[in-house]
Image: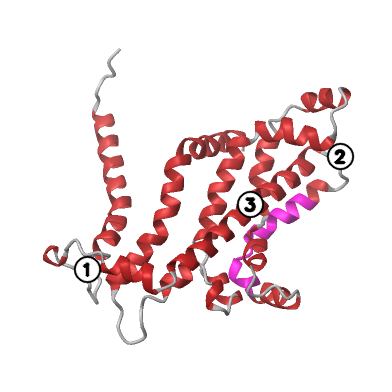
Amino acid sequence: MKQKITGGRIIGTVLVTLFAVLCVLPLLYMVAVSFTDSESLYIKLKDLRPNLSNYVYAITKRNFGLALKNSVITVVGSCLLVDVVSSMAAYGFEKKPVPGKETLFQGYIATMMIPGQVILIPMFMMMNRAHLSNTFAALILPMVGAFGIFLMRQFMVAVPNELLEAAEIDGCGEIRRFVTIVIPLVQPALITLTVFTFNAAWNNFLWPLIINTRSEMAVLPVTMSTLSSNSTTNYGMVMAGATLTFLFPFILYIFLQKQFVEGIALGGVKG
């Protein structure tokens, strides 16, 4: 059957289209400015030329390859650690009879209300005393937080207790039950958490800037921020660096879009 076209449907389509254009417009402007040598964010159409010099400079003159490698190591380590720790902690909170676990869980979730900037100094002192400054461990360990455990626990609720009990009766051990039964059932949540962690670790700027004092440990956002000088700012070069930094999460989201949307939708229904 053909759907009846109504005035409300037309208005809704127009509003959604306008909202999509407003969301995409800043990205298009960023890419457009990256092809100029402008020292102002205001550009004219005549200034736009297919000039890749800003990208060539960012890649060849600013240790782009080293920064990219550091970012990839940080992101992969962060995703693996967050997925493992969050899924195991959520499994314990939801499926194990631990006394006082609800109070502990609520207290842990309350830490999400603390701004990250508040704990920068204590975290910096802890990393220094543990001799972890200028290491990948200092970049990866702080990525573990309450959000991942909260998200995974929302999905752990849907895992049938009867299924786990039946597996235990059949002689299936704890680790095997967790790996072969629980993990496949919460796979959409793991993919969603991976995307969130990837974006957070990839775009993290302030903490890597503070904890890493050696240039060879700089990640991509920190390296791209050095494209501007103290006297003048070439916004075309800055936007080229921003475009390069944005490109990799965008490609990841394209490949994982279906699983990411599914995980968000299921999490909303279960929550």
Give the mark nearer the N terminus: 2 vs 3: 2
Label 3 environment density (alpha carbons within 10 Å; few <14, some 14–19, many ≥20): some
Q: Is mark 1 on a helix, strand or loop?
A: loop
- Protein image colouring: secondary structure
Magenta residues (range): 104-120
Q: Name the residue under label 3.
A: 147
User: Would residue 251 be counted in the magenta stretch?
Assistant: no
Q: Nearer the viewer, residue 10 or 122?
A: 122
Give the mark nearer the N terminus: 1 vs 2: 1
Image vertical order of residue 239 relative to residue 183, above or below? below
| Percent coordinates x, y for residue 250 in the rendering | 41, 50
User: Would residue 117 be counted in the magenta stretch?
Assistant: yes
Residue at image location 27% in from the left, 54% down from the top: 25
Q: Mark 2 points at which residue?
A: 97
Q: Is mark 3 on a helix, strand or loop?
A: helix
Q: Is mark 2 on a helix, strand or loop?
A: loop
Q: Mark 1 points at which residue?
A: 36
Q: Label 3 near label 1: C-beta < 8 Å? A: no
| 84 on left or right of 211 | right
Q: In which quarter of the image is residue 29?
A: bottom left
Q: Which of marks 1 and 2 is in front?
A: 1
Q: What residue type is labelled 3?
A: Phe
Q: Nearer the viewer, residue 181 or 114?
A: 181
Give the Cα separation between the discs numbered 1 and 2: 61 Å
Q: Which amino acid does label 2 sit on?
A: Pro
Q: Residue 162 carries which label?
A: none
Q: What residue type is labelled 1?
A: Thr
Residue at image location 75% in from the left, 41% down from the top: 91
Residue at image location 60% in from the left, 66% down from the top: 115
| Percent coordinates x, y for residue 19 in the rendering | 31, 46
Residue at image location 74% in from the left, 36% down from the top: 179
- The residue at the far left in this view is 46
